[in-house]
Image (cartoon, rainbow, N blue to C red):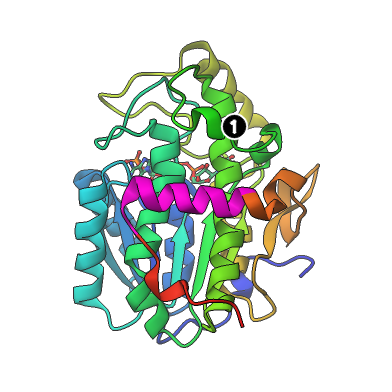
């Protein structure tokens, strides 16, 4: 694994992939590299214009590859349902799902369905999407679900089940860390259930370290992050690695044959902030099976999406 780059991705010919947040940053480079290596890539984006521009950029960079746009707003359960139906109408099977999209440290907002927006986008949106995409995922011989977390999961001492929607108090960075912990708990529980139900689907996680992307850039029409954004954005540009290199851990997780269930990959240098991918550790909170099961049940209730085909008892 030492020295691994996107150039080492094995041939992805015959595979179909969906990447969320594919119009920007890590998602764009993940989509681009998977396309360059032969996969048919569905690029999911919430904004039509930004999505179309990204598909054009990808096609210009890899004219031989297949890139298609899927409209998906993870902060809207109805959009998730129609995106999943759209995908199911286009593909027979989905080999790789990269749950990459995310928002970080935004001012308090709610999703269309009334969820706190970081939780709603980063965790609940991907929970609902993955559940709705189970039929094409399980139609693939050994699908892989890659969920993008962060070293920021380390800031969370467990999921705040007493105030999951931050109704009593809201701190943008604290809640971001919670959602990234939720990403790891989801990864673990999905993998446990996939194995328990006897499927060949594998659920894994990755994080990019510190990568210069659009994560702290305020989108038109959205509230900014004030001092935090003004301070953090330039810092990431100086200290972080490129968005292309930041995508390596999730590309490794998505494509390499030696990856096994619930693995977690991140950069190998400078305290996991930059460099080539390696297997990385996580906090004890992220391996707590009771929290993972509790979050799963709450997520089913909140989103109305149940993973019926993975509910078979473990053998
Ligand atoms: N960059 C880092 O240093 C870093 C570190 C640790 C973890 N991460 C994680 O890496 C992932 C990718 O982020 P990035 O750094 O590449 O940032 P980015 O360039 O801002 O990409 C984030 C993507 O998510 C999309 N998105 C946001 N809200 C969405 C919604 N409601 N529905 C659908 N898509 C939505 C964005 O779309 P729009 O362009 O329309 O907003 C964008 O395409 C995130 O999960 C983030 O938490 C990043």
Determine the secondary structure under disc 1: helix
Residue positioned most to the top? 227
**Residue 266 in picture, x, y percent from top left:** 69, 54
Residue sitting at 71 percent across and 44 percent down? 285
- Main SS class of the magenta portion in the image: helix
Answer yes or no: disc 1 within 8 Å of ligand 1.
no
**Residue 247 in picture, x, y percent from top left:** 56, 55
Q: Quadrant of residue 39?
A: bottom left
Q: Is residue 177 above or below residue 139?
A: above
Decide which of 289, 134 is in the foreground and name it.
289
Q: How many marks?
A: 1
Q: In what quadrant of the picture does the N terminus appear?
A: bottom right
**In the picture provided, is 85 more to the left or to the right than 309?**
left
Decide which of 254, 24 is in the foreground and name it.
254
Q: Is residue 65 in the magenta section?
A: no
**Residue 22 in picture, x, y percent from top left:** 38, 54
- Where are the magenta residues, as a range? 291-305
Q: Is residue 168 above or below residue 195?
A: above
Mark 1 packing: few (<14 Cα in 10 Å), some, or many (20+)? some
Q: Is residue 40 visible?
A: no
Pointer 1 residue = 237
Decide which of 219, 143 is in the foreground and name it.
143
Residue sitting at 66 percent across and 34 percent down? 156
Ligand 1 resides in the quarter of the picture at: top left
Q: Is residue 202 visible?
A: yes
Residue sitting at 56 percent across and 45 percent down? 182
């Amino acid at each position: 694994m030492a020295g691994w780059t996107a150039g080492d991705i094995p041939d992805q010919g015959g595979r179909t992939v969906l990447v969320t947040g594919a119009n920007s940053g890590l998602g764009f480079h993940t989509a681009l590299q998977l396309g360059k290596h032969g996969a048919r890539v569905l690029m999911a984006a919430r904004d039509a214009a930004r999505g179309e521009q990204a598909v054009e950029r990808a096609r210009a960079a890899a004219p031989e590859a297949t890139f298609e746009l899927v409209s998906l707003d993870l902060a809207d359960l109805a959009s998730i349902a129609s995106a999943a139906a759209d995908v199911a109408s286009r593909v027979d099977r989905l080999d790789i799902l990269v749950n990459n999209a995310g928002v970080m440290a935004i001012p308090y907002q709610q999703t269309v369905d009334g969820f706190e927006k970081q939780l709603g986008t980063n965790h609940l949106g991907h929970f609902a999407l993955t559940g709705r995409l189970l039929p094409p995922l399980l139609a693939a011989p050994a699908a892989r679900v890659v969920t993008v977390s962060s070293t920021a999961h380390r800031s969370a001492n467990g999921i705040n089940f007493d105030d999951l929607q931050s109704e009593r108090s809201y701190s943008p960075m604290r809640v971001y860390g919670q959602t990234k912990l939720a990403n790891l708990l989801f990864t673990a529980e999905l993998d446990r259930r996939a194995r328990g139900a006897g499927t060949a689907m594998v659920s894994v996680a990755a994080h990019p370290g510190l990568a210069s992307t659009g994560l702290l850039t305020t989108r038109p029409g959205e509230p900014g992050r004030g001092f935090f954004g003004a301070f953090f954005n330039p810092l990431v540009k100086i200290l972080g690695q490129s968005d292309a290199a930041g995508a390596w851990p999730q590309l490794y997780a998505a494509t390499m044959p030696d990856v096994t269930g619930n693995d977690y990959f991140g950069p190998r240098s400078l305290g996991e902030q930059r460099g080539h991918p390696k297997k990385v550790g996580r906090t004890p909170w992220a391996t707590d099976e009771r929290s993972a099961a509790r979050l799963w049940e709450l997520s089913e209730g909140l989103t109305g999406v149940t993973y019926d085909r993975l509910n078979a008892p473990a053998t």
